[in-house]
């Protein structure tokens, strides 16, 4: 989230698209009800299904799964056509004025530079014209035909309300009504907030869905302001923490990058990460990258990381491909290239696409270790459960170890919520039976592995032998020790570079925050963005002061919000070019002539002069990007792409299948179905009665939603002779499930041009373990393909067929 | 239990319970009516009337109320089958005192589809039909704050309370043959806490306080709904049962039947009224005093008696009214 849960109460308009906040985030959704009750805010829901969020909305419109970009680009077009643009914001705080290279263009659904062989773009034309002074050229009048604004106007000109009706199946009048509601928020004194979740991410162009809305929000001037923002609703209580800590193969903590094998030394690695300002006087905060990186290396390897050995750069693993994401790992597993899979807090047998492939892949492992508080389906993938898991156990040679771990309520530590708040919590009880804390288990494994390297040696033992392991009890680092390490401390006395007599922080002391992080090895910090979470003031994550002066929704002394306890990102943009709040009644920051003051920690140097330093300090431009240059693999603007399995050909180019640069493994390409064989669109979703695959182990939750079902329209039920509450068989090219039919008016066939598209909903909470009735999930049917940028699997739009069935026993 | 007058609506923080333990403040002395006990002495004091307000327009149907209800009352709702609807369990039961009912409605006036989700359960009538129908002395009581409670030690499992209830709420357990329904968490209210469902409700669609405060809050909600185009928004606090201590805010108060057949003008069945009218002394000889529980111990002067006619009438009621439940449009 750019903003916070509590800030949602400040909004005038909530749009839930690509999510189902009331259903999947009921506790956070209370802030929507606050905004409705106390500000008269309106709620719009755009979703293929009439959801529980739609049930409390002011306006609802249906949309065909996977067509969101058309809707969003058409929305931008409508805003431009009807002059619903926050002009001062767009001109000054976005790259609308930047001049783009002449070579850049778009035709037939593709941007310039497409290479069909490689399924990739040469992105060299997707950039600004750089002037002789080394800065990007701009035209603040927005008259230049090659400025971003004019290119955007041209790009969105194709997305008419008629195209929306034809591609999205959203009735034109519904689309226009929503446009009117959103258009009101181009006023500097009205804001809209976007709440989204997996309904946008789980597409092969998920990142572009989100960019589409982010661009709309920028055009309305809704980023950096109270009641605005792009608010990703995270699906686990600590999934924000997972990304912050960099639990991905291509990241290290604080959104730093794992090097590629081409970056042979530290200097080469840093050479592409300087991020010099693209306009005069801009901050370009990533210029501090070396400080964050060196302090991370010092946290990892302590005294073994020195200036002389490139801060132990050689100890870091190097990527030989872009990313060892989970899709690639399971592909490799299925090809027999993985021996041991260590599965911690993850249930891929139910949560990963193409279950048949997942089963086949797990069956090829030598060993599977599952660390989990619950008995997961993954840990029992080898066990025959009749039609619910019809494996030949004798043919599976994988050795499976289950390591029971503690549950969140048995742990102490911080969870990072969607709004970037690190909230400390305390253990409510001890883990049952043989269950142990994850940290204890991980410590035991590390200590044993290190012992083996010590006694037996091995290829390149240094990273293991020299790993910093400085804990009071080496068998179990405490949450406090780990949190203090994430914050960072001084390893030497640190002096002010401008005044060498002034001591900033003494050796051994916790760093105040990341402003004290050094690039000379005198500090360590395992995750720079968490700097300030546990400083000399103590554990700031444990703060529980719910005072909120002037009821701004900031709650600044409750827990700790990264970065620097800042509650709203880009908050400098809440004030105009001269530093006056756009909306005095929703003031966040103000320039008092000398510095920035207000309710939040400024997202800019406190003394940066308003007309000189622009608000988006993480970008070299100092402004936000309507045109994303070469930073995304599938284009600098979002362009419509159909799902890989779609009943409709891409209107711009019938030859294109899915996202033309999404990575697809060869065998998976052959497992995509066509609409001739599978005419019905399916979309997966979650139910409020359950949390993923956990709560089916709980009897009360199981009673509230006992059994797997699919949602289908009355029209489809009539067409196929399906009875309410009767059994159906649903199958895709990759697998079949049996389910109860929930026939409802909440799903309706969508008229897309001359084609009638049926959509069914497939919830995901059932498996073959736990208290609820045995069932399946959508992943028995979903395709093995992910987003082009971040590889999130395409769970939200795939093709199936459906028929009545006499019962699940029929197979 | 009262809300801060400075707030325009009850908030989560306000409904947080006192942190200090307090003695139960709801006892035998607060009973104003008890089943089959017409000569109950007047209560020692009058408690402030309380109410639970269910704002259907704010309800997201998450079933946190159902879950909290089962947790607090330590019941075990059955793990049933999916029968093609969102209601689970499929009906109220002796192990499930409250149930979200989901109704699908195509609004002919606006052309909009609406999903009307109503939390069903005991309405705690000011004039409780269950209590009037109950032949077991002291099995059903009403406190001066308005809560209607079942005293299970005194319950004989006859099911007359079901026929007496205009909302079809109580359910008799096949295990212990006692009748069960929502207690409005009388045990929580007694120690200064709100009902478990209100505590768990994430959107504050369920709020609890004095009836007066709840009416004020409900009126503000109705005004908000009218500003959003729900011209017929209103309060459902039916006069036919003297008003209720659980009441609703409805978007379409003119058509309560849209909400999974919420009765338009609920009244206690005429048969029950006549049968258990104030002039007639009733009792059940077969039961006697053996089942009388501790709550009302000492309050009872004599055994009530029931005539053979009463018994036949009551049985007919159970047979005819309960054997054929009304078909529901949305199932």
Image (cartoon, coloured by chain):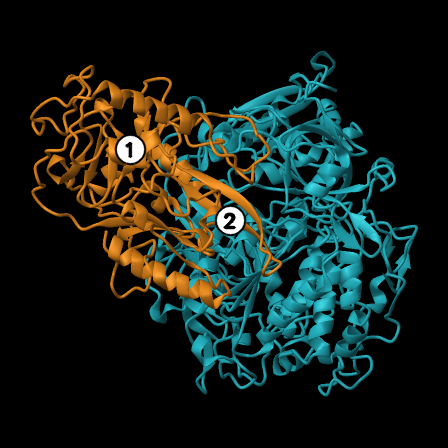
Chain colours: A cyan, B orange
**Residue A409 seen in the figure:** yes
In the image, what residue occupies the spot 35% across and 36% down? A428
Q: Nearer the viewer, residue B144 or A575?
A: B144
Q: Is residue B132 left or right of residue A473?
A: left
Q: In this view, does A454 lie to the left or right of A275?
A: left
Q: In the figure, B255 relative to A551: above or below?
A: above
Q: Nearer the viewer, residue A357 or B102?
A: B102
- The percent coordinates of residue A101 (x first, y second) are 84, 75
Residue identifier under label 2: B116
**Closer to us: mark 2 or mark 1?**
1
- The percent coordinates of residue A61 (x first, y second) are 65, 58
CA neighbours of label 1 inside 10 A, class few (<14), some (14 to 19), many (20+): many
- The percent coordinates of residue A344 (x first, y second) are 57, 33
Output the chain of dot 1. Answer: B
Based on the displayed image, in which of its 4 quarters is residue A335 positioned? top right
Disc assigned to residue B272: 1
């Amino acid at each position: 989230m750019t903003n916070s849960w509590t800030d949602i109460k400040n909004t005038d308009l909530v749009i839930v698209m690509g999510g189902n906040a009331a259903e999947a985030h009921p506790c956070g959704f209370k802030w929507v009800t606050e905004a409705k009750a106390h500000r008269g805010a309106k709620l719009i829901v755009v979703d293929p299904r009439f959801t529980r969020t739609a049930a409390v909305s002011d306006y609802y419109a249906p949309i065909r799964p996977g067509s969101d970009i058309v809707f969003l680009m058409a929305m931008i077009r409508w805003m431009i056509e009807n002059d619903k643009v926050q002009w001062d914001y767009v001109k000054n705080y976005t790259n609308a004025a930047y001049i783009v290279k002449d070579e850049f263009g778009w035709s037939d659904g593709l941007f310039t530079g497409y290479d069909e062989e490689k399924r990739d773009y040469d992105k060299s034309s997707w950039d600004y014209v750089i002037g002789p002074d080394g800065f990007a050229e701009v035209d603040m009048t927005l008259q230049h035909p090659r400025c971003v604004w004019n290119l955007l106007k041209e790009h969105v000109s194709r997305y008419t309300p008629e195209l929306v009706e034809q591609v999205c199946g959203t009735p034109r009048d519904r689309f226009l009504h929503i446009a009117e509601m959103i258009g009101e928020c181009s006023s500097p004194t009205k804001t809209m907030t976007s709440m989204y979740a997996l309904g946008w991410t789980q597409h092969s162009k998920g990142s572009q869905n989100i960019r589409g809305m982010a661009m709309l929000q920028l055009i309305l001037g809704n980023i950096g302001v109270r009641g605005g923002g792009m608010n990703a609703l995270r699906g686990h209580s600590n999934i924000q923490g997972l990304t912050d800590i960099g639990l991905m193969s291509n990241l290290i903590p604080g959104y730093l990058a794992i090097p590629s094998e081409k970056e042979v030394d530290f200097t080469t690695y840093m050479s592409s990460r300087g991020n010099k300002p693209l306009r005069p006087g801009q901050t370009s905060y990533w210029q501090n990258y070396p400080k964050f990186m060196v302090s991370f290396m010092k946290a990892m390897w302590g005294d073994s990381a020195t200036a002389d050995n490139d801060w132990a750069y050689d100890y870091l693993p190097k990527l030989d491909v872009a990313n060892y994401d989970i899709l690639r790992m399971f592909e490799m597993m299925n090809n027999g290239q993985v021996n041991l899979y260590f599965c911690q807090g993850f249930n891929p047998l139910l949560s990963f696409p193409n279950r048949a492939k997942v089963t086949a892949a797990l069956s090829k492992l030598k060993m599977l270790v599952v660390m989990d508080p619950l008995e997961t389906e993954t840990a029992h993938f080898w066990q025959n459960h009749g039609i619910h898991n019809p494996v030949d156990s004798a043919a599976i040679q994988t050795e499976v170890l289950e390591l029971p771990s503690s549950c969140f309520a048995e742990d102490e530590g911080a969870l990072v919520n969607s709004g970037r708040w690190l909230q400390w919590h305390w253990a409510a009880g001890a883990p049952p039976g043989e269950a142990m804390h994850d940290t204890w288990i991980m410590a035991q494994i590390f200590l044993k592995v290190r012992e083996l390297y010590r006694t037996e040696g091995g290829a390149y033992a240094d990273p293991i032998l020299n790993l910093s392991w400085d804990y009071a009890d080496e068998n179990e680092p405490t949450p406090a020790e780990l949190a203090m390490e994430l914050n960072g401390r001084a390893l030497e006395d640190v002096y002010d570079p401008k005044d060498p007599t002034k001591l900033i922080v003494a050796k051994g002391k916790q760093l105040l925050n990341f402003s004290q992080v050094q690039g000379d090895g005198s500090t360590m910090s395992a995750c720079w963005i968490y700097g300030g979470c546990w400083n000399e003031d103590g554990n700031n994550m444990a703060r529980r002061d719910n005072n909120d002066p002037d009821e701004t929704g900031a709650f600044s002394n409750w827990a700790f919000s990264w970065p620097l306890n800042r509650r709203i990102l880009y908050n400098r943009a809440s004030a105009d070019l001269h530093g006056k709040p756009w909306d005095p009644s929703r003031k966040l920051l103000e320039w008092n002539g000398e510095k920035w003051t207000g309710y939040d920690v400024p997202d800019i140097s406190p003394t940066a002069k308003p007309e000189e330093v622009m608000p988006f300090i993480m970008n070299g431009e100092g402004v936000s990007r309507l045109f994303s240059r070469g930073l995304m693999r599938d284009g600098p603007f979002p362009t419509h792409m159909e799902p890989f399995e779609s009943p409709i050909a891409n209107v711009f180019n019938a030859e294109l299948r899915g996202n033309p640069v999404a990575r697809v493994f060869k065998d998976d390409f052959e497992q995509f179905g066509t609409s001739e064989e599978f005419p019905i669109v399916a979309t997966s979703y979650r139910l409020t009665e359950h949390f993923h695959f956990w709560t089916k182990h709980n009897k009360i939750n199981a009673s509230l939603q006992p059994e797997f079902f699919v949602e289908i329209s009355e029209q489809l039920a009539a067409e196929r002779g399906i009875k309410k509450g009767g059994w159906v068989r649903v199958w895709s090219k990759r697998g079949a499930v049996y389910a109860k039919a929930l026939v409802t008016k909440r799903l309706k066939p969508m008229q897309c041009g001359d084609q009638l598209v049926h959509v069914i909903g497939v919830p995901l909470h059932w498996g073959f373990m736990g208290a609820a009735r045995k069932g399946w999930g959508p992943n028995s049917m979903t395709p093995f393909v992910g987003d082009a940028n971040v590889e999130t699997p395409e769970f939200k739009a795939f093709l199936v067929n459906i028929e009545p069935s006499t019962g699940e026993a029929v197979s | 239990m009262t809300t801060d007058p400075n707030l325009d609506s009850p908030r989560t923080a306000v409904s947080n319970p006192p942190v200090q333990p307090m003695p139960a403040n709801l006892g035998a002395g607060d009973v104003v009516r008890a089943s089959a006990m017409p000569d109950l002495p007047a209560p020692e004091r009058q408690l402030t009337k309380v109410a639970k307000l269910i704002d259907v327009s704010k309800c997201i149907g998450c079933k946190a109320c159902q879950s909290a209800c089962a947790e607090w009352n330590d019941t075990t709702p059955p793990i049933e089958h999916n029968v093609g609807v969102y209601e689970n369990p499929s009906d109220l039961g002796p192990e499930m005192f409250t149930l979200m009912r989901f109704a699908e409605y195509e609004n002919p006036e606006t052309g909009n589809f609406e999903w009307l989700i109503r939390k069903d359960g005991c309405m705690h009538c000011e004039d409780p039909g269950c209590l009037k129908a109950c032949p077991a002395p002291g099995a059903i009581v009403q406190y001066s704050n308005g809560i209607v409670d079942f005293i299970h030690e005194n319950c004989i499992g006859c099911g007359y309370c079901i026929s007496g209830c205009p909302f079809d709420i109580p359910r008799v357990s096949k295990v212990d043959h006692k009748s069960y329904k929502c207690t409005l968490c009388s045990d929580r209210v007694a120690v200064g806490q709100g009902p478990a469902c209100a505590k768990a409700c994430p959107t504050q669609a369920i709020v609890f306080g004095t009836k007066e405060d709840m009416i004020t809050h409900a009126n503000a909600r109705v005004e908000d709904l009218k500003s959003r185009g729900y011209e017929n928004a209103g309060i459902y606090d039916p006069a036919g049962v003297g008003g209720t201590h659980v009441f609703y805010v409805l978007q379409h108060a003119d058509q309560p039947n849209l909400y999974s057949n919420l009765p338009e003008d609920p009244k206690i069945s005429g048969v029950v009224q006549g049968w258990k009218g104030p002039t007639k002394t009733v009792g059940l000889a077969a039961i006697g005093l053996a089942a009388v529980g501790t709550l009302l111990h000492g309050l009872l002067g004599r055994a009530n008696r029931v005539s053979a006619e009463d018994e036949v009438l009551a049985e007919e009621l159970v047979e005819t009214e309960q054997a054929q439940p009304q078909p529901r449009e949305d199932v």
